[in-house]
Amino acid sequence: MRQKTKLSKLFTISAIASGLLLAGCGDDGKDGKDGVDGKDGADGNAGQSVVASTTSGFTIPENAIFVAPDAADGDDITEALSLALFEVPEDALVVLPKGRFLVTEGIVVNSARGLTITGHGINETILDFGTSNGDDAFRFQGGNGITIRDLGVYEAPKNGIKTTNVNGIHITYTATVWEGELEADNGAYGLYPLKSQNVLMENNYAYGSADAGIYVGQSENIVVRNNTAKNNVAGIEIENSSMADVYNNIAVGNSGGILVFDLPGLVKAYGGNVRIFNNQAYNNNADNVGANVVGQVPPGTGVIALASSDVEIYNNQITDNDTTAVAITSYFLINDDVASYPATFGATMADGWSPTLKNVYLHNNTIARNGSNPRGDLLAPIIGGYTSAGNSTGMPQTFPAILYDGIGELLSNTGDLGAFNGIVGPEAAADGVNYDAYGPGDLICVNSNINGNPAPEYDQVNTGLVYPTDPAAATVDGDGNPVPQLLIDQMVNNTYLNCVQPRLAPAVVNFRNNIYGCTGDDLAEAACSL
């Protein structure tokens, strides 16, 4: 396996801790979730003698299972770790040693129940998979009530920590890192819950993923909070997932900061009710070295919603992204051959996936200093039009800080997608999936966002609409295809997308019979009152 150059002095282990402090992290061990002091049974070890505490305050009792407790820095602990996690007993607490250790095989855990795996801290226990012959560093298959905490996974060949079909997964104070520059041959995903329920991800750090640093896919009941995602292709990504709250996170230095995607061809065909709020998404200007759809995300994008409906994006600080603050787009931007969709995507469309997106509500975000160097092959013609005389004003413009492609809505409103209704299966149709003209509840709404550009100029922040959504305003070319008009308007009091949608419901995570999120342990959190 490849060995990468280790971190320079510009990015040291201490940078992880500082990144987490920026995210507002900190734990005294008495929050009711973890440790001997926990009173709610989440991860507590009440009644046991304490032999150690992690840097986050999680307490370790004497009856824990200790993996290679006498190991020295650089030792290979693969065998001891595999043995400890083979047929691990229910409600076990497995403690990894302090230091940096080699792990030369992927670790697979099947159907664990109530398992907690802890190191001594996000910087104190580091597992180096740089010579591993597996794909995933850790893979948890099935099970429930699993906690992973206070450790770092470095240089995984493919994915850092992957969970599939787990009901109740809590990942906290955990890092996944690929050291050095962001490269195409880095591992794909850092923290990677998939096809799971009741997902709680908090206080984590993800660096260097060639796909997504913090990712949740095809899952339900999700809270992602107080994490830092830095120098990944996608910082934080919610894909084909339902009932997700993403708040109080930092996404910095990625190609795209925070992504909400519905992609075709997946078992869970579509998601919904995703709230992105009170995050900081800034300086997401890394070159995109990714593959597949994420590889098409324009570098310099703060937040992007792609073919995902029922999304609310609010009260975020979205600044200093070279291309745009927020992009809202149908899948037609990825594949514009509309006539090919029944043949190419018919099966997944029958299950409810749609290339269009509906009910995206963007409000009360502070947006500043975006669009200074727009780039990316996906947007190249659009960038060329807005930054030249080829837009609706006939004059070069600063690239829009908020960009909506509009084409899916336009084609729905003209009736050109009406035949797709015959593809939609009965279950998806009953859930409201259709290609009818957009009604009020389907609209993309942008209002009450704040121009955060510095005084005294307060340089104008623009909203761009690539295609008009009103058929009466559309024009077509000689082949009958709609012509992009590259409309542009000021963000404050814009006229194209100025509407309001009902607020979405909070996500609820039930982990070990305790409720987490804005209706549970964060009920008094300021972000949850926005």
Image (cartoon, rainbow, N blue to C red):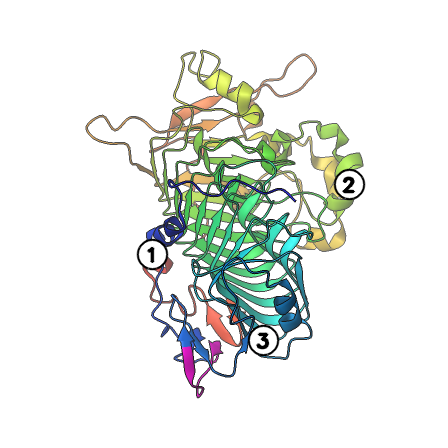
- The secondary element bearing badge 1 is classed as loop
- Disc 3: which residue: 114
Can the viewer see residue 457? yes
- At label 1, counting other C-alpha atoms closer than 10 Å, the crowd grade (few under 14, some 14-19, many 20 or more) is some
Residue extending furthest bottom? Answer: 47
Q: Is residue 94 shown in magenta?
A: no
Q: Which numbered disc covers residue 346?
A: 2
Vertical placement of residue 409 versus 275, above or below: above
Ranked by sequence position, the earlier of labels 2 and 1 is: 1
Q: How many marks?
A: 3
Q: Is 474 displayed left or right of 430 in the figure?
A: left
The residue that appears at 48% across and 56% down in the rendered structure is 245
**Image: magenta residue range:** 41-51
- Disc 1: which residue: 24
Q: Is 289 displayed left or right of 322 in the figure?
A: right
- Can you tell which quarter of the image residue 162 is in? bottom right
The residue that appears at 52% across and 72% down in the rendered structure is 69
Q: Nearer the viewer, mark 2 or mark 1?
A: 1
- The secondary element bearing badge 2 is classed as helix
